[in-house]
Amino acid sequence: KDQNGNEFFTKPKVTFEDVAGLDEVKEELIEVIDFIKKSEKYKKMGAKIPKGILFYGPPGTGKTLLASAVAGETKSAFFSASGSEFVEKYVGVGAKRIRTLFEKAKKEAPSVIFIDEIDAIGAKRHLDSNNEKDQTLNQLLVELDGFNTDQTVVVVGATNRLDLLDEALLRPGRFDRHMYIGNPNIKAREEILKVHTKNKPLSPDISIETLAKKTHGMSGAHLSNIANEAAIIAVRENNTIITHRHFDLAIERVIAGLQVKNPNVL
Ligand code: ATP
């Protein structure tokens, strides 16, 4: 356990079925899953298991969800961290945390380490390369280079901004597989809405197809929010089922929320 009493890792039950759309990315990840599941076979053949995968793209599109699904599919220990957790005032503290994280992941292998907002530690280094951030990034590079083929540890980094990352991080043998996770198209929005309404009592007047049309530009996180808001509105109105009108109100609410944050969106 960490200082806050939280478990360092979980064993997620999430699988690819919980991730809607993103078919091409899932297909690429099936290969990684096979590496983790049958690591012995690959090792015997002298093949190197990929170490680092980078998910990039806009927020709320399922990067965290996908990474935990990789752990779920392979029954791996899932270590989830955010890059900003490693940004510290005192030199060496962030680096030490990185070391501890990898030590534990190796001990629990097979493991998936997920580092969200990896740009917080992996941004391009400056020439006077001796500050706390650079030490943390250097430690991450050391860890990525360091673990050998006996340990099945896959590191997944996520960022909204691939262009901010230090090239050293993207070199072969480090985060060398880059997968773009974009906002869902109409078909994917339909599938995401299906996932998030699966356990909700829907009125027959609801057309998921229409809802998908009405939610152009929205992310998976927005759609999951809309499904939840619609259910809340239905409860407030003392209904036993969710109707299309509840969804319309929920969509309005989510759009209003977006416009507060960024008036130019949608
Ligand atoms: P961030 O960049 O902000 O960290 P993210 O890309 O990691 O975002 P997630 O945290 O994985 O996004 O997504 C948030 C929630 O949105 C998920 O827990 C899930 O409920 C829903 N969601 C997003 N994408 C999908 C998807 N493709 N299928 C099903 N649910 C999704």
Image (cartoon, rainbow, N blue to C red):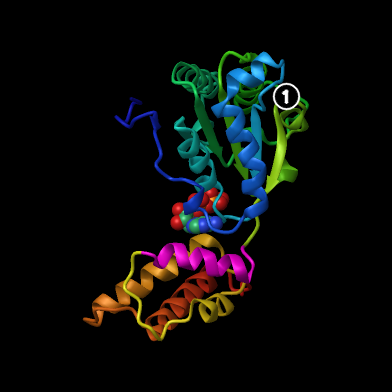
Q: Is mark 1 within 8 Å of ligand 1?
A: no
Check the image and report above or below for 113 versus 208. Answer: above
Q: Main secondary structure of the magenta part?
A: helix
Name the residue located 48 percent from the left edge and 41 percent from the top edge: 68
| The C terminus - image quarter | bottom right
Q: Where, by quadrant of the figure, is residue 162 drawn? A: top right
**Residue 149 position within the rendered picture, expressed as x and y whole percent measured from the top left:** 63, 15
Q: Which residue is nearer to you in this view: 64 or 27?
A: 27
Q: Does the magenta stretch include residue 185?
A: yes
Q: Which residue is nearer to you in this view: 225 or 69?
A: 69
Q: Callout 1: 10 Å neighbours few (<14), some, many (20+)?
A: some
**Residue 107 position within the rendered picture, expressed as x and y whole percent measured from the top left:** 45, 16
Name the residue located 45 percent from the left edge and 39 percent from the top edge: 72
**Residue 49 position within the rendered picture, expressed as x and y whole percent measured from the top left:** 66, 24
| The N terminus - image quarter | top left
| Residue 184 shows up from this direction | yes
Name the residue located 70 percent from the left edge and 21 percent from the top edge: 48
Q: Where, by quadrant of the figure, is residue 237 drawn? A: bottom left
**Residue 134 position within the rendered picture, expressed as x and y whole percent measured from the top left:** 66, 25
What SS does tag 1 mark? loop
Q: Which residue is nearer to you in this view: 259 or 129?
A: 259
Q: Where, by quadrant of the figure, is residue 170 drawn? A: top right
Horizontal side of 39 relative to 12 (left or right) equals right
Residues drawn in magenta: 184-198
Amino acid identity at mark 1: Gly
Name the residue located 46 percent from the left edge and 31 percent from the top edge: 79
The residue under label 1 is 173
| Residue 119 shows up from this direction | no
